């Protein structure tokens, strides 16, 4: 459990609790047991756990099955798997796209967890 802000130049994985903002030059992966109360900024944000805060991703935000986001998203690409939950507003750039995962891709994503 961490109370405070995290700044990282490399990819980080969160499997515990963080009460504070996360600013990462790499990717942020929130595991199934991960819980973040704060804003996240990273290249890619992949969540299987819970985030209560706003997320800004340079490339992609992905909410996996069982992942929950309460907050706003700003990213060019947003992927929400079946069983993922999102409550908030989403801002996407003109080059952005919404991606729906095929069953094959969902199985592949689950296997990587």
Image (tube, rainbow, N blue to C red):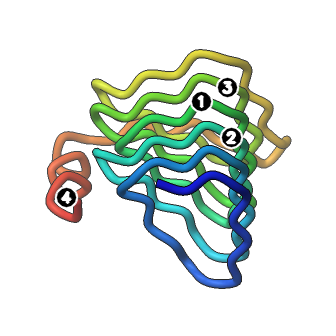
Query: Element under label 3?
Result: loop
Query: Reading the chain from its start, which is encountered first: label 4 or label 2?
Result: 2
Q: Which residue is mark 4?
A: 108
When the figure is inspected, residue 59 is found, relative to residue 98, above or below; the finding is below
Closer to the eye: label 4 or 1 = 1
Query: Reading the chain from its start, which is encountered first: label 4 or label 1?
Result: 1
Q: Which mark is residue 52?
A: 1
65, 38: nearer the viewer: 38
Q: CA distance from mark 4 to mark 1?
A: 26 Å
Q: Residue at x 63, y 47 (%)?
A: 77
- Quadrant where the C terminus is found in the figure: bottom left
Q: CA distance from mark 3 to mark 4?
A: 27 Å
Q: Which residue is mark 2?
A: 38
Query: Reading the chain from its start, which is encountered first: label 3 or label 1?
Result: 1
When the figure is inspected, residue 98 is found, relative to residue 96, above or below; the finding is above
Q: Horizontally, is 79 left or right of 27 in the view? A: left
Q: Residue at x 57, y 36 (%)?
A: 98
Query: Element under label 4?
Result: helix
Closer to the eye: label 3 or 1 = 1
> Can you see residue 14?
yes
Give yes or no for contact between labels 3 and 1 (Cβ–Cβ under 8 Å).
Answer: yes
Query: Element under label 1?
Result: strand
> Can you see residue 76?
no
Q: CA distance from mark 4 to mark 2?
A: 29 Å
Q: Position of residue 16 (x, y in %)?
A: 39, 53
Q: Which mark is residue 71?
A: 3
Q: Residue at x 44, y 67 (%)?
A: 13
């Amino acid at each position: 459990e961490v109370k405070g802000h995290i700044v990282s130049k490399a990819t980080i994985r969160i499997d515990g609790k963080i009460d504070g903002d996360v600013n990462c030059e790499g990717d942020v992966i929130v595991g199934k047991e991960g819980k973040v109360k704060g804003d996240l900024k990273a290249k890619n944000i992949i969540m299987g756990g819970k985030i209560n805060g706003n997320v800004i991703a340079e490339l992609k935000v992905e909410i996996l099955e069982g992942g929950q986001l309460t907050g706003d998203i700003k990213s060019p690409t947003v992927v929400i798997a079946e069983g993922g939950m999102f409550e908030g507003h989403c801002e996407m750039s003109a080059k952005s796209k919404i991606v729906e995962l095929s069953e094959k891709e969902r199985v592949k994503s689950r296997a990587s967890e």
